[in-house]
Amino acid sequence: MSAFTNKVVVVTGGSEGIGKALVQQFLQMGAKVATCGRNYDKLYQLQKTSPTKPLMIHTADVSKEQDCQNFIEAVVKNFGTIDILINNAGISMRALLEEVELEALRKVMDVNFWGTVYCTKFALPYIIANNGTIVGVSSIAGFRGLPGRSGYSASKFAVNGFLESVRTELLDSGTNVMWVCPGFTASNIRKAALNKFGKEQGETSMNEGEMMSAEECAEHIIHAIEKRKRTLVLTFTGKRTVFMTKLFPSLADKLTRKYFFKEGQLVK
């Protein structure tokens, strides 16, 4: 038996990437898992890979409050309670502020920040009752503002601040709250990143093969949940970035600018 046997685990955005890896690994560890996403076909294909496992799928857009409430209520109706909530659903963006349309920034904030707020709020009574865990899959961009990702960085800074506040509120309740910053991980998030018009990019200039796999990232997250950690920063680059930003912020500005720009043009 694992520490997660018969625990009810909710993962938003579980149809691909880190979310999918989390769903599959929790199922293998004996948990009852519920996940949501906007694309029913992808969720159905995920369910087909584990036909004998207790997996509940639900179509939902986490940027919509009612969708989040319906999802959490469906989980409780199906499994009776919630032990762990992992706010994983998210989108990114690549566009300079002077070029981007405000709607693109609004979309990113609605999914990344408000999706986390909605699901956490509705699941909170059950998690507190079970001395459970709330997780936010954040980003290094939540510690260090990244050029061309102003909306994404803002949303992740907001997620970190929100969860830190909630953690402090619940410090004596037996509930653990943690936020995870994976660094660059091989997933679809960069291809699905919004351009300046708020549409999916459909491509990425970064080499996914050199990044941490979604499966390895999921393993680290699950281990951190079991250990009831406060924060988790992954990859050497991620840890170095957080360290440099805290101690040498002006130098971090220059190094970050150099990494993301070439001949004055945004390339990453």
Image (tube, rainbow, N blue to C red):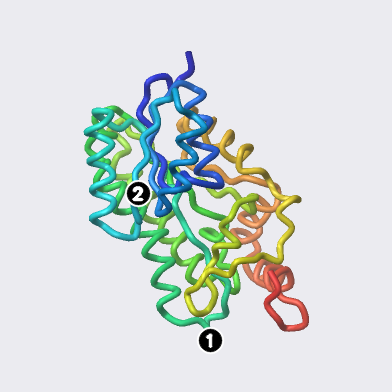
Contact, CB < 8 Å: mark 2 with mark 1? no
Query: Which class describes the residues within 10 Å of circle 2: few (<14), some (14-19), or many (20+)?
Result: some
Q: Which mark is residue 98?
A: 1
Which one is nearer the viewer's eye here, 75 or 44?
A: 44
Q: Amino acid at mark 2?
A: Thr
Q: Can the viewer see residue 177?
A: no
Which one is nearer the viewer's eye here, 165 or 7?
A: 7
* Residue for point 48% across, 70% down: 151
Vertical arrangement, residue 47 with respect to residue 140, above or below: above
Q: Secondary structure at mark 1?
A: loop
* Comparing labels 2 and 1, the label whose residue is closer to the camera: 2
Q: Secondary structure at mark 2?
A: strand
In this rendering, would 261 be left or right of 168?
A: right
Which one is nearer the viewer's eye here, 36 or 1?
A: 36
- Residue 217 location in percent, x, y? 60, 40
- Residue 126 location in percent, x, y? 24, 34
- Residue 255 location in percent, x, y? 72, 68
Say which label, 2 or 1, has the lower sequence index. 2
Figure quadrant of residue 6: top left
Q: Which mark is residue 59?
A: 2
As measured in the structure, the alpha-carbon distance from the residue carrying label 2 to the one carrying label 1 is 35 Å
Query: Which class describes the residues within 10 Å of circle 1: few (<14), some (14-19), or many (20+)?
Result: few
Vertical arrangement, residue 252 with respect to residue 51, above or below: below
Figure quadrant of residue 56: top left
